[in-house]
Image: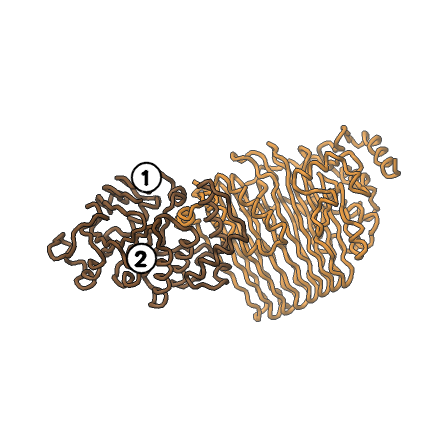
Amino acid sequence: MSDTLREIEELAEASYEYGFSTDLDTDIAPPGLTEDTVRLISAKKDEPDWLLDWRLRAFEAWQSMDEPDWAKLEIKPIDYQALSYWAAPKSKPVLDSMDDVDPEIRDMFDKLGIPLHEQKMLSNVAVDAIVDSVSVVTTFKETLAEAGVIFCSFSEAVQDHPELVREHLGSVVPVRDNFFAALNSAVFSDGSFCYIPTGVRCPMELSTYFRINSMNTGQFERTLIIADDDSHVSYLEGCTAPQRDENQLHAAVVELVAKDRAEIKYSTVQNWYPGDKNGVGGIYNFVTKRGRAHTDAKISWTQVETGSAITWKYPSVILQGDRSVGEFYSVALSSKHQQADTGSKMIHIGADTTSSIISKGISTGHGQNTYRGLVKVLRSGENARNYTQCDSLLLGSDCGAHTIPYIEVKNPTARVEHEASTSTVGEEQLYYCRQRGMSEEDAMSMIVNGFCREVFDELPMEFAVEAQRLLSMSLEGSVG
Amino acid sequence: MLHVENLTASIGGTPILKGLDLTVGAGEVHAIMGPNGSGKSTLAHSLAGRDGYEIGGTATLDGADLLDMEPEARAAAGLFIGFQYPVEIPGVNNMYFLRTALNSVRRARGETEIGARDFLAVAQEAMDLVEMKQDFLNRSVNSGFSGGEKKRNEILQMAVLKPRLAVLDETDSGLDIDALQIIAAGVNALRDPERSVIMITHYQRLLDYIKPDFVHVLVDGRIVTSGDHTLALHLDDHGYGDYLNHELDDAPGRPLSGAAL
């Protein structure tokens, strides 16, 4: 047994005084959130004092904050004391080889279509697999290390690269940024960390796969990606959760730092459990994603969101350096009783900065889809440019689409364009396809996929296929 | 092939087709002419199964009861409509659309689906027929197409789907003479002893290029007279005025075997 393993065993033994219960498969904390919980998480992870202090500052801030109530979302009250803030698969998470992965975890990812055996994997994608709160395996570490790329779980990064973490953690999303970011900062469990050194083009796609497994557990991951000068990385994120009757809380924070002339492309396919057709269960997804683009840097967010009962998410770019570029491409589907309030923020600080926002909202069933976006040009944002296009598609008569753009321009040379459209899938289109022999469902799926084309084209190939399949599956039964 | 008897169609209680009879044999080309609002397009959509009509009477294609089928089943049975106003489907690749359509029909008929590579050959042949360039297949279905391109795309689809019966609804409208000739050449190339065509048109012009075996005049929801292609020439000279009051004395020709009046 390794030293780390023994330490964890000892912690688990000692955990009675902290109220931990341990069962055979999952190490799970009892419900409740106090300063002790924060200390406990930090101790479990053997964190340095500076990080514990940082968490405690966040916790203190969180206690004085209120949940945001401005979104167009109807949310049942969340009892933060009824949740558990730590859950980990019992087998030792940090592994040296794929063969060490718990077969049950491997099976779970196989079922999800994410094979963790290196020989079966997509040869150009490295995966960090996160179950509940803990990273269970990171693939292709050695290949990446040869290029100088650091790709590991957040916990490992804290141990192995503390200076990088300390410098950048909270530099884009400060602990007081918002209620959910503060909560995440206090209790975040794990996540992915990525550093691309100067001048390096990351040799493969990096991917994190999130899975919520345990009941009554909040999931709080923290992702930090740092692309040093002149580097390039494409990062993929996938999410699923099992079907449960109660709502589960997911509050993640993602921070991106693109230094001079660096480029980060961040893609998400989010398929958290959306709840059943009566609106029972499903994930509450409150996510803060933000990037800081330095001089001549580029940050691009692409997301396909089909899951979650509640989505509250505004991936943003702070265009700090001159000539930096921010992009946001989004498809958000709200079916059943799903509610999505999502969009983007582009903050133009530097001169000659450009941003574009392409948002495609699809509502069906009783789904409610709101685009909420902010384009802000500061006085320093000379010649800033933004183009925003929001298209909404309505399928059925019980759903809704809303577009709420905020535009604040403090520099007269800036140019900001906003276009919006709302359409329904026309009877004419369906009839045309059916006359050519397609079933109504196939026709619907084809038309909706066509509507999303501009966004799918931005996704890496494997993800684009996955996204189309997901969308078709999510649309099943929305015809007629 | 196609037998239509006493076909009625109304929208929201307003009758449009008022008892239409039509028989089309294998390999025949029929033209249906008539003034605006006489029910020409309604005939096409009634056969194709578009929502929104209350339908009566019977229509069979090769003995199968069309009126009892979903639109996609009618397509699989071999019915093709060349639309007057083909709809745009943004973001859907024309080639992908065509292949999905062809494979849907093949599946419904219990045939094997056709792979991407084999399909390319099928599509190429069809494109040559209507003189289209390769990039046409990579554009979105009808999106930003000119009027002429949309109509050519309809004939392209017909060439790929190889229907038993094609109903071309005002395929000639809005075309310049060059486009008209291309489309006529395409339709003529697709004439076959096993394939029938119904051309719905306002004008004689198209019939100069695609010579019909039979011409029918549709007025106020009924076929009021039928004849050979000379009937169309007569209409071109005299208009439909003769028929609006059901005065048939001046019309040449009598109902022929193709039309059960």
Cβ–Cβ under 8 Å for marks 2 and 1: no
Q: Amino acid at mark 2?
A: Glu
Q: Residues within 10 Å of mark 2 (few under 14, many from 20)?
A: many
- Residue occupied by mark 2: B170
Chain that is coloured brown in the picture: B
Question: In the rendered picture, chain A carries what hue?
Answer: orange
Report the residue that reaches farthest toward the left: B249
Q: Quadrant of residue B168?
A: bottom left
In the image: residue A339, left or right of residue A318: left
In the image: residue B69, left or right of residue A327: left
* Quadrant that contains the C terminus of chain A: top left
Label 1 element class: loop
In the image: residue A351, left or right of residue A102: left
Report the residue that reaches farthest toward the front: B193
Numbered mark located on residue B186 in the image: none
Q: Where in the figure is residue A288, as x and y percent of width and height?
A: 65, 50
Label 2 element class: loop
* Quadrant that contains the N terminus of chain A: top right
Towards the viewer: A124 or A194: A124
Q: Residues within 10 Å of mark 1 (few under 14, many from 20)?
A: few
Q: Where in the figure is residue A99, as x and y percent of width and height?
A: 79, 39
Q: Amino acid at mark 1?
A: Gly
Residue A63 appears in the picture as rendered: no
Q: Earlier in the sequence, mark 2 or mark 1?
A: 1
Q: Where in the figure is residue A180, as x and y percent of width and height?
A: 66, 45
- Residue occupied by mark 1: B63
Image position of B247 with respect to A470: above or below: below
Towards the viewer: B132 or A6: B132
Q: Where in the figure is residue A476, as x and y percent of width and height?
A: 50, 40
Q: Are marks 2 and 1 on the same chain?
A: yes
- For disc 2, the chain is B
